[in-house]
Amino acid sequence: MPVQLDVTLCCFTSVMRRVQMMTVRGMRMVSASLVFAGAMMFGCFAMMLRRVFMVFSSLSVMFLQFLHWIFLFFLGLV
């Protein structure tokens, strides 16, 4: 357990040293990258919602056609 804790603390301190050495320009680059990644995630989420909507609309069309067929069957027109 102490070895794992030492390794974790060593990794954390190395990350903190790098963050302390980061310039203001580098921080702007990080924030710009996060904004870009957020925009990409929003676009992927919108595309996924569009596909889900298309599946449900196709299922509703199939269900309505099935109901239409049943209605015609009971009227004796099929």
Image: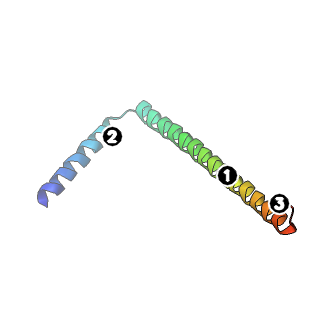
Q: Which residue is labeled 2 in the image?
A: 19
What is the three-letter code of the residue carrying label 3? Val
Residue drawn at point x = 41 percent, y = 32 percent: 26
- Residue 68 picture location, percent across and down: 81, 61
The kind of secondary structure element at disc 2 is helix
Q: Nearer the viewer, residue 71 or 36?
A: 71
- Image check: 31 left or right of 51? left
Circle 1 crowding by C-alpha within 10 Å: few under 14, some 14–19, many from 20: few
The kind of secondary structure element at disc 3 is loop
Q: Nearer the viewer, residue 55 or 7?
A: 55
What is the three-letter code of the residue carrying label 1? Phe
- Residue 65 picture location, percent across and down: 77, 57
Contact between marks 2 and 3 (CB within 8 A): the answer is: no
- Residue 46 picture location, percent across and down: 62, 46
Residue drawn at point x = 67 percent, y = 55 percent: 56
- Image check: 38 left or right of 15? right
Circle 2 crowding by C-alpha within 10 Å: few under 14, some 14–19, many from 20: few
Between disc 1 and disc 3, whose residue precedes? Answer: 1
Q: Nearer the viewer, mark 1 or mark 2?
A: 1
Q: Nearer the viewer, mark 2 or mark 3?
A: 3
Q: Which residue is labeled 3 in the image?
A: 78
Circle 3 crowding by C-alpha within 10 Å: few under 14, some 14–19, many from 20: few
Separation of marks 2 and 3 at Cα, in angstroms: 75 Å
Q: Nearer the viewer, residue 67 or 33?
A: 67
Residue 53: mark = 1
> With respect to residue 2, does 23 lie above or below?
above
